[in-house]
């Protein structure tokens, strides 16, 4: 029985209301800041095939619908009422969990003794063991270092807790009481979902319910395809870069070809760089999943905000994802910082769509989020871990609209933590928490500015751990005359004699009085900055988003005594200027880098690398790049732009290094 549009809307909202009630039940009962403050969790209801058909509109993540739930469900087939399955293992769950802190629970839902659906939830727990507090570091090299791995198994049997599993988790977490409280909150919410779904089925009958489950997904499929048909048929290619993999300073390239045919979109990730030695790899199991499709999720839901959030959205999307790349990890690759490479894929898909539908797309977002935590050793030897802030960048500008300031929700909509909570639960003092002036890319429509924060330790036993520290060298690109946003800057003890720049953080030990300042990137600008309305530039200066100096140099607007000097501004804006070289402004570093390491050369390099054993690729690749640019091997060489200026010499050196170390015959030197 097909449902009409009104019935579909009613059913869809009823089902999402059930998941919303589950969602807030977790948040009310949780004890961790990740859940109660940042909202780093979600829940959903799945059909018998493991597809999402109901998702909470209040969830801070809009894209987790595109998950592989089936593998985990099939791993524990003998389910009974009251059972709850647990896993956090990216490999055993085939990508349902994508790093170990994300604990997933699945409960089979029964109505009158018959299995009718599954309820799911995940929570990012504060600590699941491993080498560092909070269980996340970019420096870890295999998943065995990252924490406790829990393959799919029963956490509850017929409603009774499996105390052996609870005890195992308690013994491996630095904050066991908080972690176990979150698990119980999740389990309670899943039981609530079963009760509410049973009530719904009793109201309408099982046959009508099953028809609704199918109809809402079919409806989402049709709506999504209508949106994707806005993209003209064709193939669009783009790539972007992670700054490095932390164990080396060699950039990591993420490449995509977006092919569109009548509303069907294929993402071909062939050409993306090999997996890295550290924890930036994505455990996608070679399949379509949310870390690969979340830019398309944003595109679809922006164009159709009322579309039901269910698995039907993704039926029009396919992925080619070869094994062994940074986007397709293979056991036992480390994966805890698996969001960084997808962020570059996000920007790559965004760039490809700019070529296809420029009027619908923004410039690059700030391109990173930096959740960081503070751990301290207590008098009894125990460890305390407190999340400080999920630091946010600005969003990219688009035609007719400035980028959103200090609130990049392209990845998620996690909330900031109240400073009183941070200071009340840790030995930190927050001395500064503000927007970062001049970080948004200049443009006719300005890129959104990023956040900035400074924290000071009040203990000698403090350790800061941070993840997601990207856009240190490759700024967020501007488009159509707009300029790039600012890069990320991290400073230890700013303004003191021992001040130093910090790159990516494994563990940053803080003595009493030490400070850390994080200055987040801004989004890229759109359009010629000299075409920006003078009144808007003045308002930005008054509000602190743009400095007076930047107003003059970036926008050609002269401000004196709080007003625009019209004569000087007109003179400055009338002066000759060089025209943009292309629709994209990537910044000087990427331009210099790609003058040496262009796309054809990189594709050829990767073809040869993938003929090697996996264990050899990283070392050979690093050796090639460090031979071409020796400064990459020197930690003291902060600025690499000068080293890249001798383009022709470096191109010749690159060709020689590839032929020597990766000859086409396959006999590797």
Image (cartoon, rainbow, N blue to C red):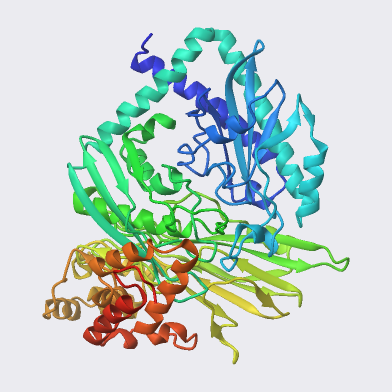
Instruction: Kindly identify the residue that appears in the image at 36 percent across and 11 percent down.
Output: 2
**Could you tell me which residue is drawn at 60 percent across and 28 percent down?**
119
Q: Classify residue 160 as left or right of residue 154.
A: right
Left or right, 470 with reference to 598: right
Is residue 207 shown to the viewer in this render?
A: yes
Q: Nearer the viewer, residue 134 or 413?
A: 134
Q: Residue furthest right?
A: 380
Between residue 63 and residue 329, name the one nearer to us. 329
Residue located at (79% from left, 42% from top): 166
Quadrant for the C terminus, please. bottom left
Q: Is residue 358 visible?
A: no
Q: Could you say where residue 345 lies in the image, as x and y percent from the top left? A: 37, 55
Query: At 44% from the left edge and 43% from the top edge, which residue is drawn?
Result: 289
Q: In this view, does 25 lie above or below 399?
A: above
Residue 98 in percent (x, y) is at 55, 49
The quadrant of the image that shows the N terminus is top left
The total number of labels drawn is 0
Left or right relative to 262: residue 4: right
Q: Where is residue 24 shown, x and y percent of the image?
A: 62, 36
Q: State the residue in front, 207 or 321.
A: 321
Quarter-of-image position of residue 300: top left
């Amino acid at each position: 029985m097909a449902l009409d549009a009104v019935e579909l809307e009613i059913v869809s909202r009823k089902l999402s209301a059930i998941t919303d009630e589950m969602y807030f039940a977790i948040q009310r009962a949780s004890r961790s800041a990740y859940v109660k403050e940042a909202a780093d969790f979600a829940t959903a209801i799945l059909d018998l095939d493991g597809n999402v058909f109901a998702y909470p509109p209040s969830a801070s993540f809009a894209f987790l619908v595109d998950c592989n739930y089936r593998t985990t469900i099939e791993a524990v087939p003998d389910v009974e009422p009251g059972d709850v399955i647990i896993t956090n293992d990216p490999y055993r769950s085939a990508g349902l969990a994508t790093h170990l802190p994300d604990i997933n629970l699945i409960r089979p839902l029964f109505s009158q003794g018959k299995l009718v659906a599954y309820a799911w939830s995940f929570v990012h727990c504060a600590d699941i063991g491993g080498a560092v507090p909070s269980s996340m570091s970019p420096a870890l090299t295999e998943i065995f270092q990252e924490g406790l791995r829990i393959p799919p198994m029963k956490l509850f049997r017929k409603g009774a807790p499996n105390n052996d599993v609870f005890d195992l988790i308690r013994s491996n977490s630095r904050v066991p009481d908080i972690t176990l409280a979150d698990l119980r909150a999740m389990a309670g919410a899943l039981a609530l979902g079963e009760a509410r779904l049973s009530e719904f089925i009793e109201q309408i009958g099982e046959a009508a319910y099953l028809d609704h489950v199918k109809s809402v997904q079919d409806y989402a499929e049709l709506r999504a395809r209508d949106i994707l048909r806005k993209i003209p048929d064709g193939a669009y290619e783009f790539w972007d870069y992670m700054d490095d993999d932390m164990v080396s300073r060699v950039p990591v390239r993420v490449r995509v070809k977006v092919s569109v045919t009548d509303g069907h979109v294929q993402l071909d990730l062939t050409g993306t760089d090999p997996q890295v030695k550290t924890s930036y790899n994505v455990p996608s199991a070679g399949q379509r999943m949310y870390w690969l499709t979340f830019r398309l999720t944003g595109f679809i839901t922006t164009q159709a905000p009322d579309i039901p959030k269910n698995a039907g959205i993704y039926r029009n999307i396919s992925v080619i994802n070869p094994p062994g790349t940074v986007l397709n990890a293979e056991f036992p690759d480390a994966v805890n910082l698996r969001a960084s490479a997808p962020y570059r894929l996000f920007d790559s898909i965004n760039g490809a769509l700019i070529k296809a539908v420029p009027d619908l797309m923004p410039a690059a977002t700030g391109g990173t989020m930096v959740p960081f935590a503070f751990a301290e050793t207590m008098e009894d030897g125990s460890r305390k871990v407190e999340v400080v802030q999920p630091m946010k960048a600005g969003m990219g500008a688009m035609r007719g609209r400035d980028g959103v300031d200090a609130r990049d929700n392209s990845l998620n909509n996690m909330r900031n933590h109240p400073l009183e909570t941070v200071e009340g639960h840790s030995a930190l003092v927050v001395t500064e928490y503000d927007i970062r002036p001049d970080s948004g890319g200049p443009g006719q429509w300005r890129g959104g500015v990023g956040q900035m924060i400074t924290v000071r330790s009040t203990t000698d036993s403090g350790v800061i751990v941070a993840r997601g520290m990207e856009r240190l060298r490759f700024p967020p690109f501007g488009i159509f005359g707009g300029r790039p946003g600012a890069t990320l800057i991290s400073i230890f003890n700013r303004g003191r004699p021992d001040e130093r720049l910090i790159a990516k953080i494994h563990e940053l030990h803080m003595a009493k009085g030490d400070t850390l300042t994080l200055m987040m990137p801004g989004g890229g600008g759109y359009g010629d900055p000299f075409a920006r309305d003078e009144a808007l530039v003045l308002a930005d200066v008054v509000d602190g988003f743009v400095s007076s100096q930047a107003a003059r140099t970036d926008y050609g607007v002269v401000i004196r005594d709080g007003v625009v000097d019209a004569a000087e501004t007109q003179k400055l804006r009338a002066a000759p200027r060089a025209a943009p070289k292309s629709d994209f402004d990537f910044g000087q570093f990427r331009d210099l880098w790609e003058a040496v390491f262009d796309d054809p050369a990189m594709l050829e390099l990767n073809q040869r690398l993938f003929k090697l054993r996996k264990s050899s690729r990283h070392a050979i690749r690093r050796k090639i790049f460090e031979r071409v640019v020796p400064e990459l091997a020197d930690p003291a060489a902060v600025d690499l732009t000068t080293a890249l200026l001798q383009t022709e010499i470096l191109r010749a050196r690159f060709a020689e290094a590839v032929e020597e170390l990766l000859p086409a015959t396959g006999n590797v030197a």
